[in-house]
Amino acid sequence: MDKEISTTDFWLSLDWFSPSTLQSFTWEHPIFLYAIPLVPVLILIRWMWRYWFNQKLPVALAQRDLQSSALTLLRLIPDFLIMLVLMLLLVALARPQKTNEKVDEWTEGIDIMIAIDISQSMQISDFEPNRLEAAKNVAIDFIDGRLQDRIGLVVFSGDAFSLAPLTTDYNLLRSYIKEIDFSMIDNRGTAIGSALGVVTNRMRESDSKSKVAILLSDGDNTAGNIDPITAAELASAFGTKIYTIIIGKEGMVPYGKDFFGRPNMIDNTVDETTMRKIASIGGGEFFRVSDNRALERVFDTIDQYEKAEIKETRFKDTADYYQHYLTWGIVLLLLWLFTKSTFISNVLQD
């Protein structure tokens, strides 16, 4: 098996001529490689011209004795050496190289605030097992699919507060989401405007180029001291894109069970107009979902919309190896000159 050579290998190593080494190179001027087969052809023509056309080669070498035949072969050494010199020169001119390319990638993350409604109506079980648990599950899946993004959490019902600041600690975020329940806020109602206010307050601290808010609710704005439209305009002024999601069906929906285990049916209404306008002001998109799978698709869609920008820098480290073949060529050229010296020439002529 051919041995792989490194940049520190000595030029004298024969591994420079192994097939695996030669195949591992990239050639800056490969056209010179096509001339290599011509070298022995030219040497052969020269030899035939000198010995055949000038009749310096006896007609029948077979008639010579062993010593004379050996001497004839010795006379071919200079031609063989100059042939190798020319071939090595062509290899050096082709400029064998090895290039190591290194790619550095980094992500310019997005800041995302997720605001989750924990009002009592989120206990309605038109989702499995209920609206809140369905929202928590897709939020966790959404976080699992992000990379290098800072994510924060806001929960709201009659009031709103920040459950988690913007962070890349996804394990912490998952644990916070799992702990979300209806007892976190005592005040009843749905304070959508207050939730957007808390989101905006968190986003004011962000210097990210991309800021996104995902507002998930199932009802009308019935609480809080900030109008949702005003809050949306304020969030937009701070460069926050807003996606709004209405979760749940409208009309009669199951809410709890009666004494006999049968579901209680209540009338559910939502303010779709306000949620649409919030998304429009925030430059995002409005979604209406009525089951678990639809909610998952919405978060998948937002995940595709809000992809972090991946940048890369490429570094090329190119090493030349022509000098090794040029050194071999110079050594063989010196050896050829030695064979052309007077003493050696006389020996070969004798």
Image (cartoon, grey):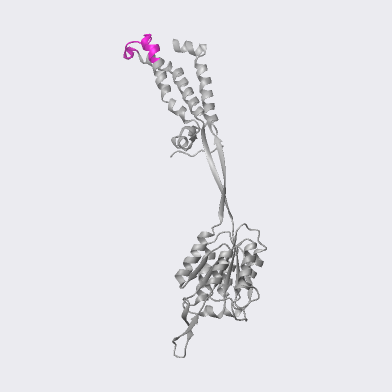
Q: Is residue 229 above or below residue 91?
A: below
What range is drawn magenta here? 47-64
Residue 221 drawn at (x, y percent): 58, 76
Is residue 25 or residue 239 the one in the foreground?
A: 239
Q: Quadrant of the C terminus?
A: top left
Q: Is residue 57 magenta?
A: yes
Residue 70 drawn at (x, y percent): 39, 17
Q: Is residue 224 above or below residue 199?
A: below
Horizontal side of 178 relative to 57 (left or right) equals right
Residue 255 drawn at (x, y percent): 49, 83
Q: Is residue 36 above or below residue 220?
A: above
Is residue 9 or residue 150 the one in the foreground?
A: 150
Q: Can you tell which quarter of the image residue 316 is in?
A: top right
Residue 65 drawn at (x, y percent): 35, 13
The residue located at (53%, 30%) in the rendering is 322
Q: How many marks?
A: 0
Q: Can you tell which quarter of the image residue 56 is in?
A: top left
